Image (cartoon, rainbow, N blue to C red):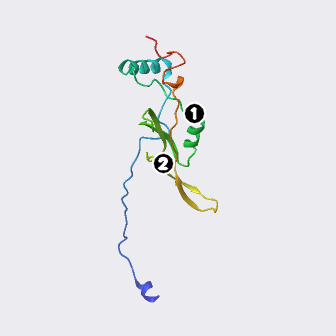
Amino acid sequence: MRLAQNLRFNQTTKLTIMVETKTSNLTACVGEEIGQALGAQMISSYRAANPTDVVSYFVGRNILEQVMAQPGCVGIKFYNAYNEVGSKTLVYVGVNADGADMLSVSTINTFGELSQVKGIVADRIRLPGGDGLDTDGNWWDFE
Protein backbone atom coordinates (compact mmCIF):
# COMPACT_ATOMS: atom_id res chain seq x y z
CA MET A 1 0.00 0.00 0.00
CA ARG A 2 2.70 2.45 1.04
CA LEU A 3 4.59 1.89 -2.22
CA ALA A 4 1.48 2.68 -4.25
CA GLN A 5 0.90 5.88 -2.30
CA ASN A 6 4.45 7.10 -2.90
CA LEU A 7 4.25 6.65 -6.68
CA ARG A 8 3.78 9.84 -8.59
CA PHE A 9 3.29 10.24 -12.27
CA ASN A 10 4.77 13.41 -13.68
CA GLN A 11 3.48 12.72 -17.14
CA THR A 12 0.08 11.58 -18.24
CA THR A 13 0.20 8.76 -20.73
CA LYS A 14 -2.37 8.93 -23.45
CA LEU A 15 -3.31 5.81 -25.35
CA THR A 16 -4.68 6.27 -28.81
CA ILE A 17 -6.10 3.37 -30.71
CA MET A 18 -6.37 3.69 -34.44
CA VAL A 19 -9.35 1.91 -35.95
CA GLU A 20 -9.83 1.53 -39.65
CA THR A 21 -13.47 2.11 -40.41
CA LYS A 22 -14.82 0.71 -43.63
CA THR A 23 -17.85 2.58 -44.89
CA SER A 24 -20.26 1.19 -47.40
CA ASN A 25 -22.28 2.96 -50.06
CA LEU A 26 -24.91 0.22 -49.73
CA THR A 27 -27.35 1.80 -47.29
CA ALA A 28 -31.10 1.85 -46.74
CA CYS A 29 -31.15 5.20 -48.60
CA VAL A 30 -30.12 3.72 -51.97
CA GLY A 31 -32.81 3.94 -54.64
CA GLU A 32 -35.31 6.56 -55.59
CA GLU A 33 -38.52 6.98 -57.54
CA ILE A 34 -37.61 7.92 -61.12
CA GLY A 35 -41.05 8.31 -62.71
CA GLN A 36 -42.65 6.59 -65.67
CA ALA A 37 -41.02 8.69 -68.37
CA LEU A 38 -37.42 8.03 -67.28
CA GLY A 39 -38.24 4.40 -66.44
CA ALA A 40 -39.72 3.92 -69.91
CA GLN A 41 -36.71 5.54 -71.55
CA MET A 42 -34.28 3.33 -69.63
CA ILE A 43 -36.21 0.13 -70.42
CA SER A 44 -36.61 1.06 -74.10
CA SER A 45 -32.88 1.75 -74.43
CA TYR A 46 -32.03 -1.61 -72.86
CA ARG A 47 -34.56 -3.48 -75.02
CA ALA A 48 -33.19 -1.85 -78.18
CA ALA A 49 -29.67 -2.99 -77.27
CA ASN A 50 -30.78 -6.46 -76.04
CA PRO A 51 -33.88 -7.46 -78.00
CA THR A 52 -33.72 -11.18 -77.12
CA ASP A 53 -33.05 -10.75 -73.38
CA VAL A 54 -35.64 -11.36 -70.67
CA VAL A 55 -37.95 -8.34 -70.38
CA SER A 56 -38.66 -8.51 -66.67
CA TYR A 57 -38.67 -10.63 -63.52
CA PHE A 58 -41.33 -10.87 -60.83
CA VAL A 59 -40.46 -11.38 -57.16
CA GLY A 60 -43.29 -11.75 -54.64
CA ARG A 61 -43.68 -9.53 -51.61
CA ASN A 62 -43.48 -12.36 -49.05
CA ILE A 63 -39.90 -13.41 -49.80
CA LEU A 64 -38.75 -9.79 -50.09
CA GLU A 65 -40.23 -9.06 -46.65
CA GLN A 66 -38.58 -12.19 -45.21
CA VAL A 67 -35.19 -11.09 -46.53
CA MET A 68 -35.67 -7.50 -45.27
CA ALA A 69 -36.88 -8.71 -41.85
CA GLN A 70 -33.50 -10.30 -41.06
CA PRO A 71 -31.83 -8.40 -38.19
CA GLY A 72 -29.46 -5.78 -39.59
CA CYS A 73 -30.72 -5.96 -43.18
CA VAL A 74 -30.65 -2.57 -44.95
CA GLY A 75 -31.37 -3.72 -48.50
CA ILE A 76 -31.30 -6.52 -51.04
CA LYS A 77 -28.63 -7.34 -53.60
CA PHE A 78 -29.74 -9.06 -56.84
CA TYR A 79 -27.29 -11.29 -58.69
CA ASN A 80 -27.73 -12.36 -62.30
CA ALA A 81 -27.61 -16.14 -62.40
CA TYR A 82 -28.61 -19.31 -64.23
CA ASN A 83 -30.90 -21.75 -62.43
CA GLU A 84 -30.60 -25.54 -62.32
CA VAL A 85 -31.96 -25.94 -65.88
CA GLY A 86 -29.83 -23.15 -67.35
CA SER A 87 -32.50 -20.43 -67.50
CA LYS A 88 -31.58 -16.86 -66.63
CA THR A 89 -32.74 -15.86 -63.15
CA LEU A 90 -31.96 -13.65 -60.17
CA VAL A 91 -30.49 -14.77 -56.86
CA TYR A 92 -31.12 -12.26 -54.09
CA VAL A 93 -29.68 -11.86 -50.63
CA GLY A 94 -29.96 -9.37 -47.77
CA VAL A 95 -27.19 -6.82 -47.27
CA ASN A 96 -26.09 -5.38 -43.91
CA ALA A 97 -24.97 -1.82 -43.11
CA ASP A 98 -21.35 -2.77 -43.90
CA GLY A 99 -22.40 -3.71 -47.44
CA ALA A 100 -21.80 -7.42 -46.82
CA ASP A 101 -24.09 -10.16 -48.07
CA MET A 102 -25.96 -11.60 -45.09
CA LEU A 103 -24.97 -15.25 -45.41
CA SER A 104 -25.33 -15.70 -41.65
CA VAL A 105 -27.53 -13.84 -39.19
CA SER A 106 -27.31 -13.47 -35.42
CA THR A 107 -30.47 -14.56 -33.63
CA ILE A 108 -31.69 -15.59 -30.19
CA ASN A 109 -32.45 -19.32 -30.02
CA THR A 110 -35.16 -21.02 -27.94
CA PHE A 111 -32.79 -21.18 -24.93
CA GLY A 112 -32.31 -17.40 -24.99
CA GLU A 113 -28.76 -17.73 -26.31
CA LEU A 114 -27.19 -15.79 -29.16
CA SER A 115 -26.59 -18.05 -32.15
CA GLN A 116 -25.83 -17.84 -35.86
CA VAL A 117 -28.24 -19.13 -38.50
CA LYS A 118 -27.95 -19.14 -42.28
CA GLY A 119 -29.14 -15.96 -43.96
CA ILE A 120 -31.78 -16.16 -46.67
CA VAL A 121 -30.46 -16.65 -50.20
CA ALA A 122 -33.47 -16.61 -52.51
CA ASP A 123 -34.57 -17.31 -56.07
CA ARG A 124 -37.67 -18.69 -57.76
CA ILE A 125 -38.60 -15.56 -59.65
CA ARG A 126 -41.40 -15.66 -62.20
CA LEU A 127 -41.23 -14.37 -65.70
CA PRO A 128 -44.42 -12.46 -66.61
CA GLY A 129 -46.32 -14.53 -69.18
CA GLY A 130 -44.13 -17.53 -68.32
CA ASP A 131 -41.63 -16.75 -71.08
CA GLY A 132 -40.19 -13.42 -70.02
CA LEU A 133 -42.40 -11.48 -72.38
CA ASP A 134 -44.25 -8.50 -70.93
CA THR A 135 -47.96 -9.38 -70.70
CA ASP A 136 -49.04 -5.90 -69.58
CA GLY A 137 -48.30 -4.43 -72.97
CA ASN A 138 -45.23 -2.38 -73.62
CA TRP A 139 -46.04 0.60 -71.38
CA TRP A 140 -42.36 1.42 -71.52
CA ASP A 141 -42.23 1.49 -75.33
CA PHE A 142 -43.34 5.07 -75.92
CA GLU A 143 -41.17 5.94 -78.91
The spot of residue 62 in percent (x, y) is 60, 37
Q: Quadrant of the C terminus?
A: top left
Residue 15 or residue 34, whichever sits in front: 34
The local secondary structure at tag 1 comes to loop
Instruction: Return the disc, 2 or 1, that comes first in the chain's sequence.
Output: 1
Find the residue positioned furthest to the top: 143
Name the residue located 55 percent from the left edge and 42 percent from the top edge: 67
Find residue 102 and name its label: 2
Of the two numbered discs 2 and 1 in the rendering, the one whose residue sits closer to the viewer? 1
Residue 80 showing in the rendered view: no
Q: What residue did someone put label 1 on?
A: 60
**What type is the residue that disc 1 sits on?**
Gly
Name the residue located 64 percent from the left edge and 59 percent from the top edge: 110
- 120 displayed left or right of 48: right
Find residue 72 and name its label: none
The spot of residue 138 in percent (x, y) is 49, 15
Task: Tell me the quarter of the picture where residue 69 sits.
Answer: top right
The spot of residue 99 in percent (x, y) is 43, 45
Name the residue located 52 percent from the left edge and 15 percent from the top edge: 137
Task: Relative to 85, say whether 69 is above or below.
Answer: below
Name the residue located 35 percent from the left edge and 72 percent from the top edge: 11
Q: CA distance from mark 2 to mark 1?
A: 20 Å
**What type is the residue that disc 2 sits on?**
Met
Residue 82 or residue 108, whichever sits in front: 82
Find the residue positioned furthest to the front: 85
The local secondary structure at tag 2 comes to loop
The spot of residue 41 in percent (x, y) is 43, 18
Residue 15 or residue 50, whichever sits in front: 50
Task: Relative to 10, say whether 116 is above or below.
Answer: above
